[in-house]
Image (cartoon, helix red, strand yellow):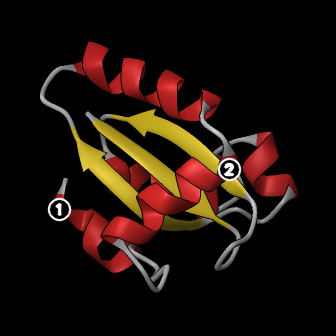
C-alpha cells in the first residue's frame, strides 16, 4: 500500500492520498479522474511516496499527515525530494 503526496507545483497546493497501485492512481489524477479536489486545483505531480506493507498503517499515516500543518508536510516532502521533482516516472515500480 502506498501513501503519496501530489503537488500542483513546487510549494503549490498539496493532496494526500493512499492507494494499492501508485502508478494507476497517479494516472487517474493526471486524467482528471483521481479526485475532484486534485482535478480542480491541478494537483497531479507526485512529489512524495512511501510504501507500507500493512494497509491499515498506510491509512493511519494518511490520516495523520492530513492533520499536519502545511509546514510539516513541506518538510516531509523536502527531506525526501528537496527539488520537488515529479516522481511520476518512478511510480511504475508498484
Point out the tag, 1 or 2, that comes first from the N-terminus. Answer: 2
Residue 28 seen in this snapshot: no
Q: Is residue 64 left or right of residue 40?
A: left
Seen in the image, is 41 located left or right of residue 89? right
Closer to us: 58 or 69: 69
**Most distant residue in the top direction:** 56
Which residue is pictured at 63% across the width and 54% down the height?
71
Q: Picture coordinates of residue 76 (x, y %)?
A: 43, 56
Q: Secondary structure at mark 1?
A: helix
Q: Are marks 1 and 2 in contact (CB under 8 Å)?
A: no
Along the line of sight, the residue nearer the viewer: 22 or 28: 22
- Considering the numbered disc 2 on the image, is that residue within a helix, a strand or a loop? helix
| Disc on res. 93 | 1
Question: Which residue is depicted at the point 27% across and 19% down?
Answer: 57
Q: Residue furthest left?
A: 53
Name above or below for residue 11 compared with residue 75.
Answer: below
In the rendered structure, the answer to whether residue 40 lies left or right of residue 61 reads right
Quadrant showing the N terminus? top left
Q: How many marks?
A: 2
Q: Residues within 10 Å of mark 1 (few under 14, many from 20)?
A: few
| Inter-mark Cα distance, 1 to 2 | 28 Å
Question: Is 12 located above or below residue 25 in the figure?
Answer: below
Which of label 1 and label 2 is nearer to you? 2
Label number found at residue 70: 2
Q: Callout 2: 10 Å neighbours few (<14), some, many (20+)? A: some
Numbered tag placed on residue 74 in the rendering: none
Residue at 71% x, 41% y: name it: 35
Give the vertical position of 29 relative to 9 (above or below).
above
Q: Residue at x 70, y 70 (%)?
A: 8
Q: In the rendered view, does 64 fall on the left or right side of 61?
A: right
Q: Quadrant of residue 45?
A: bottom right
Residue 2 percent location from the top left of the image: 31, 40
Amino acid at each position: 500500500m502506498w501513501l503519496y503526496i501530489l503537488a500542483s507545483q513546487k510549494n503549490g497546493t498539496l493532496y494526500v492520498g493512499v492507494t494499492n497501485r501508485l502508478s494507476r492512481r497517479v494516472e487517474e489524477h493526471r486524467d482528471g479522474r483521481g479526485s475532484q479536489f486534485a482535478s480542480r486545483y491541478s494537483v497531479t505531480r507526485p512529489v512524495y511516496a512511501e510504501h507500507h506493507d500493512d494497509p491499515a498503517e498506510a491509512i493511519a499515516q494518511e490520516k495523520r499527515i492530513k492533520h499536519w500543518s502545511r509546514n510539516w508536510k513541506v518538510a516531509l516532502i523536502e527531506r525526501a525530494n528537496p527539488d520537488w521533482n515529479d516522481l511520476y516516472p518512478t511510480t511504475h515500480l508498484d
